Amino acid sequence: MLPLEGITVVALEQAVAAPFATRQLADLGARVIKVERVDGGDFARAYDANVRGGLGTHFAWLNRSKESVALDLKQDEGRAILAELVAGADVFLQNLAPGAAARLGFGAEELRARDPRLIVVDMSGYGTRGPYRDKRAYDMLVQAEAGLISVTGTPETPVKAGSPLADIAAGMYAFSGTLAALVRRGTTGEGAAIEVTMFDAVAEWMSQAMYTTLYTGSVPPRTRLSHPVISPYDAYPTADGVDVVIGVQNDRGWAALANGVLDRPDLVTDPEYATNQARVRNREKVDAIVSGVTSAMGREELLRRLDEAGVANASLNDTRGLIAHPQLAERDRWREVGSPVGTIRAIRPPVTFADAEARMDPVPALGEHTEAVLRELGRDGAAIGRLSESGTVRLHAAAPPAT
């Protein structure tokens, strides 16, 4: 049994942050009913068409194991159907613009007044108060506003993180917050109203850099791949032309590198290099010494020597390297899931239970489950047909309503 079997989540969601949270709930066994617009659904479906030429990569990643119900919430009957779904749910999660859910009749206060056991999770860019309340909040914009871009890149050029980290951070906190609320409800019987913002999530992730400024007055410099307060910690060249990342966390690690790889035991006691703070001050000299040795070795030889010396290291992979990574293959991390464009490969969720396989059901087509869910709510074929004709709901084209 997966830990969230029997839990129902209704998600009024789109894009990345909220779908990432609810997909993880689905991974753990929750039933996730994804409510989408009738006119195209979650816009992440069409960010690109890179999955088999027809499905967006973001959507394929974030929406497996969910049921898609397409409703027009501008219509009274559409809102009535959503209200019925929420009435039978344990969790209602939404990431509409601030205040939009409340205007539709689905604000946390109103919903929890009707059902005190309900857990309501409101996600947004900046929250429901403050001068940035209504500011648009896409991933890159929040990375910029929260300072993440300022510490990423080269000394000359700031860059955003390559993955949507603001969305992922918010999704992780919504996921963990929902789990905490479910645990508390199991003890007290009370639900919760939870607010998670992308800005707050990234601000939390920026805390180490922020503390540097708070207590030194200086802004952490951008240091390419290197670590701002640790040295050596960077990518170093090899004779094969492929860089290897070396990370020395402490002075013991430096001694292991100096003795076991650099063949320079003198560096262990030399005051210019003996301590991490000294090495940071002399970063250019340290990098020159390390690079001078690594550039004369082939990649495999360097990795072997680093491993034998107990020095932390990694290959500087791209996405092809990740897909072919032996660790994923050896640990059986790949699965196949269905989708509207056919079977696709997907990585198993990081949370791995020893006694239960994570749920990895198909990625839904838009409105694929509308009819089935409406029948659960008591609508017959005639009623479903009428709702479809009025545009209140959208049915999956391959499954027209029965008469």
Image (cartoon, rainbow, N blue to C red):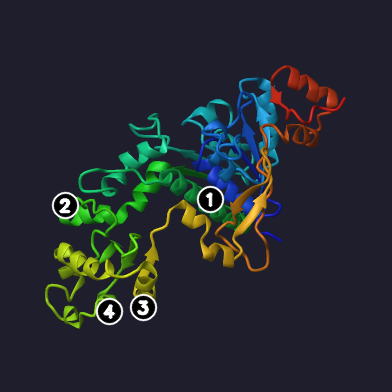
Dot placed on the residue nearer the N-terminal end, 1 or 4: 1
Q: Nearer the viewer, mark 4 or mark 2?
A: 4
Depth check, front residue: 170 or 103: 170
- Callout 2 amino acid: Ser
- Residue 218's label in the rendered image is 2
Q: Nearer the viewer, mark 4 or mark 3?
A: 3
- Callout 1 amino acid: Phe
Q: Nearer the viewer, mark 1 or mark 4?
A: 4
| Inter-mark Cα distance, 1 to 2 | 34 Å
From the image, tell me which residue sits under label 1: 175
Where in the figure is residue 8, as x and y percent of width and height? 67, 46
Depth check, front residue: 154 or 17: 154
Where in the figure is residue 281, as x and y percent of width and height? 14, 64
From the image, tell me which residue sits under label 4: 252
Task: Assign a secondary structure to mark 2.
Answer: loop
Where in the figure is residue 319, as x and y percent of width and height? 47, 52
Q: Residue at x 74, y 28 (%)?
A: 397
- Residue 26's label in the rendered image is none
Dot placed on the residue nearer the N-terminal end, 3 or 2: 2
| Inter-mark Cα distance, 4 to 2 | 29 Å
| Inter-mark Cα distance, 3 to 2 | 34 Å
The answer to whether 346 appears left or right of 232 in the picture is right
Where in the figure is residue 283, as x and y percent of width and height? 18, 63
Task: Assign a secondary structure to mark 3.
Answer: loop
Dot placed on the residue nearer the N-terminal end, 4 or 2: 2
Q: Is residue 192 visible?
A: no
Say above or below: 392 vs 245: above
Q: Nearer the viewer, mark 1 or mark 3?
A: 3
Dot placed on the residue nearer the N-terminal end, 1 or 3: 1
Dot placed on the residue nearer the N-terminal end, 4 or 3: 4
- Residue 310's label in the rendered image is 3
- Callout 3 amino acid: Gly
